[in-house]
Amino acid sequence: MATFLYKLGRLTFRRRGFVALIWVALLAVAGIGAATASTATSSSFSIPGTEAQRAFDLLEERNPGNSADGATARVVFKAPEGEKVTDAENKREITGIVKELQSGSQQIAKVDDPFQVKAVSQDGSTAYISVSYQVNSMELTDATRDSLEDAGKDAQKSGMKVEIGGDALQVMPHTGTAEIIGVVIAAIVLVITFGSLVAAGLPLLTALIGVGIGVSTITALANVLDLGSTTSTLAMMIGLAVGIDYALFIVSRYRAELADGRDREEAAGRAVGTAGSAVVFAGLTVVIALVGLAVVNIPMLTKMGFAAAGTVAIAVVIALTLVPALLGFAGKRVMGRKARKAAEAEKSPEAKPNMGTRWARFVLRRPVWVMLVGVLGLGIVAVPAASLEMGLPDDGAQPKSTTQRQAYDMLSDGFGPGFNGPLMVVVDTKNSSDGKAAAARVSEEIESIGVVAVAPAQFNKAGDTATIVVIPKDRPSSHATEEVVHDIRDAGGNIKADTGAEVLVTGATAMNIDFSQKMNDALVPYLALVVGLAFLLLMLVFRSILVPLKAALGFLLSVVAALGAVVAVFQWGWLGSLFGVEQTGPIMSMMPIFMVGVVFGLAMDYEVFLVTRMREAYVHGESPGQAIVTGFKHGARVVTAAAVIMMAVFAGFIGSSEQMIKMIGFSLAIAVLFDAFVVRMAIVPAVLALLGKKAWWLPGWLDRALPNVDVEGEKLQQQLTDESGSAGSGDGGGEGERELVRV
């Protein structure tokens, strides 16, 4: 592989104008496709194999006009102090809003008058209008949302407090500011790392081109493939981070080769041949982790994983082709001013050991202590993970300034927290001899469980399917509400045995519970698949059993520690005000598996980039201890910069008003912090120092069975040595051209 990539690097360097033109053309085509594509009108969310989804499907089949999975809204009214919503003037205003909503959009399925359906609190201070839509929240038009918001504004003129809850106003948050913050911090880190504006700008430029192509392609295909806006957000987040990092490693290696005396084309070839090999395998681990999300069997998550994996693949190809091409345009300006002056004076710019070298020597002197401090430190941070409670955040997790949160609080105060998350019980009476009796039995069983209210059963036209709305006592995301769902389902088994009627629990709250359970059940198989495949891949890269095993165990330690930090902040509320957490609650159910997928791929980046340099030095004859020092000498500063950049990109999302985006940003940033600086920079060299030569041991039979992908460039070195020996002085490379590939 190193030989092929070496030739590719030289080719793209020589044909830099043609290569750059191709990438600009691809960006233009993707941009035009995104601009001309029809707007995505659907972003369906389904959870195959769950009871909640089966209930939705049954209702769609038996009562298609009911729009069971359509968006909902609640316009909540609170009368001024000393008044009631039932007062003549207030009642007239609310009734007028009902009529306004009914005629406000063709997407509306039903608007309930609170005075007819008894949606008025006992003290008469609060009432709410329930609005049901024919389509889900992502399919609502802007005009429909505007009419809903306008209705609320009109009602406020009467003096009543009016707020709107439900998922009808739910839109994906705008995260443009987050990306800008991440890019600015990345630019600062790159300038500090390279000491050259040209070298710093190159990774940023190539990363933005890659993200532009990836996100534009997703936008262009969104309507055809039913891709939601979260898909492009994830692709942008990950694509930007890995795109900068991959280019960073190629540019860094190129500068090292120039410092060793290579001519520019040769330096580009060797940079792509060595660091490029690490980029390929690092990219493969990220792709495996993202594509592996398909095992969860949730279509939306699968599409998100594949789309983000595609963006990562683009970042890899750009690093291998566009980066060396742009290096050709950059000339000597890619080197810092000090390095250029040193080169002109034919002096080495490095007069003393750098920070990476000093740290590696410190670890070699005290490997046991470094390992113990690292492991125990992460272990302590991981303790809260044992109390992990999973669910999906409801409107109660929104900032207090939002209308959704205020509507949530008004409903809780006026009716009880359970009104924010009603359950829908579907009774399939097709195989029952007496459907009405069966539905009545279901209502009785639910009332005996202990809930606030059970609405009368509503049958479809055929009379073979009934729906019963149940109001639990506690808020939607509480453990008590989850127990109510399980109790109803348990009772349903006995009812089916006695009456033949099947009882299914659905609704947004039940769907969230089923989603959480499905994610929990998929975590172990997903971990086994991703870690297993990556273990095999890393065994190919490092020609070792213990190094990949150590990499996987270190990753698990950093992920559990990151989960512990997430629980402490978002579930327990520690330092919550610092991160803008206004209400604690369960951790988003997709967080553990999502974090495993993304962080595993990124963690393996650092493992590959850092340890391949050690492996390269070891293969070229250095002792195990000296190889560790060499790896840190050349890789520590770049890996540190890469980690800081990635943390900056992710941390930018902590400022989002959406709890979900905030949680994702925090979890990924803290996981990268733990994995890069504690696991890879401390625990990994300590373990390698203790293992010595055993770290690179591989059974002979396995060594013969595994293909040699030559990531460390051993074959490339031999080939270049043979060529330089037979070619004499060569074609202008000088002494540097005849040198071996230096580490």
Image (cartoon, grey):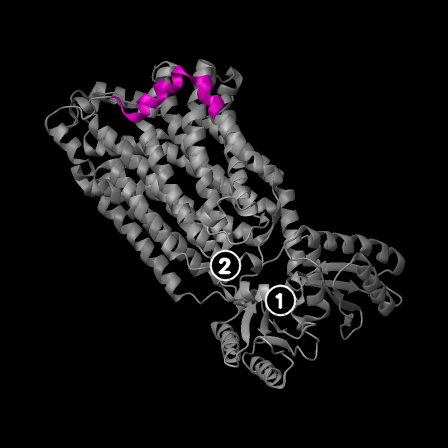
Image x and y of residue 289, in percent: 51, 40
**Type of the residue with mark 1:** Leu
Q: Residue at x 65, y 43 (%)?
A: 521
Q: Is residue 56 above or below residue 243?
A: below
- In the image, 28 versus 347, the foreground residue is 347
- In the image, 687 versus 262, the foreground residue is 687
Q: Which residue is mark 1?
A: 411
Residue 196: name its quadrant. top left
**Type of the residue with mark 2:** Pro
How many marks the image carries: the answer is 2
- The local crowd at label 2, few if under 14, some if 14 to 19, many if 20 or more residues have their Cα within 10 Å, is some
Precedes in sequence: disc 1 or disc 2: 2
Q: In the displayed structure, does residue 189 sit left or right of residue 481?
A: left
Badge 2 element: loop
- The local crowd at label 1, few if under 14, some if 14 to 19, many if 20 or more residues have their Cα within 10 Å, is many
- In the image, 516 versus 401, the foreground residue is 401
Q: CA distance from mark 1 to mark 2?
A: 16 Å
Q: Main secondary structure of the magenta part?
A: helix
Write down the region rendered in magenta.
353-373
Image x and y of residue 388, in percent: 60, 42
Q: In the displayed structure, does residue 700 sit left or right of residue 609?
A: right
Q: Which residue is mark 2?
A: 399
Quadrant position of the C terminus in the picture: top left
Instruction: Give the label on residue 689, or none.
Output: none
Q: Is residue 258 above or below residue 625?
A: below
